[in-house]
Structures are given as structure tokens and as C-alpha cells.
Amino acid sequence: MLHNKAQSQGGLIGNMAEIIVYTTNYCPYCVKAKQILRNKGVDFEEIDLTNDDAGRIALVEKSGGRKTVPQIFINGQHIGGCDDLVDLDAKGELASLLV
């Protein structure tokens, strides 16, 4: 598993949410989800599962059976994938989870 800490500039100031994004390096939805979070100005941890079969199996268990990436967790709560993140943002519910 490759762990990266991504830091953003601008957006929300002083966020305290712990955000973990499980990704692969070939996934366009992962890129989109990470860009949404960067645009919000929040830091997140990226866990790259590109060549990590054991990590993918563990993620399926952790995410309640979901096999796709990205899978996003905010403060230990499974948010879902990129579409779920977009929906939360569109409903105005994402910002409150990020602080």
C-alpha cells in the first residue's frame, strides 16, 4: 500500500476532518474525487492500491462490499465513491463533514 499525504491550498481553513481516499493510479474517478477535495482546501491521505491485491480485499471488507475505487472515508465514516462525494457536495452536505 502506498500512502501519500495530499495538502491543499485555499478553501476551508483549519479543517480537522481525517480524510482517507483509497485509489489506483489509473482511475479517472479517483483523480476527480481528489480534485474535489483539493478544491475544498482540505488535506487527505491517499492510499494507492494499484498493485495491492491484499489491500483491495481489505478495502472491500472495510467499505461494506464495494469493489471500486475511489472509496472515501471521512472521520472513519464511509462516504462512498466519487459519485457519492459529488452528490454530498451538490446537496451542500460535504462542507459540514470536512470541518
Image (cartoon, helix red, strand yellow):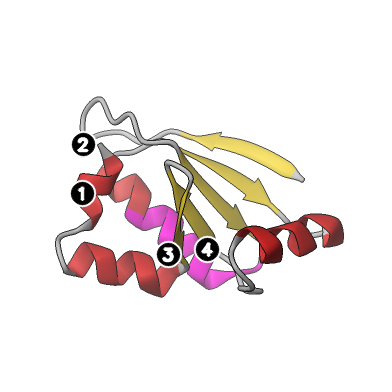
Part of the protein shown in magenta? 24-36
Q: Which residue is mark 3?
A: 32
The residue shown at (64%, 58%) is: 62
- The C terminus sits in image quarter: top left
Contact flag, marks 4 and 3 (Cβ < 8 Å): yes
Measured from the top left, where is residue 48 in percent x and y?
A: 68, 51
Q: Amino acid at mark 1?
A: Ala
Read off the residue under disc 4.
Answer: 30
Q: Which residue is mark 2?
A: 12
**The residue under label 3 is which amino acid type?**
Lys
Question: Is residue 25 among the parts visible in the rendering?
Answer: no
Q: Nearer the viewer, residue 23 or 26?
A: 23
Give yes or no for contact between labels 4 and 2 (Cβ–Cβ under 8 Å): no
**Image location (x, y in percent) of residue 80:** 46, 66
Distance from Cα at disc 1 to Cα at disc 4: 19 Å
Whether label 2 touches label 1, CB < 8 Å? yes
Q: Is residue 88 above or below residue 67?
A: above
Mark 1 element type: helix
Q: CA distance from mark 4 to mark 3?
A: 5 Å
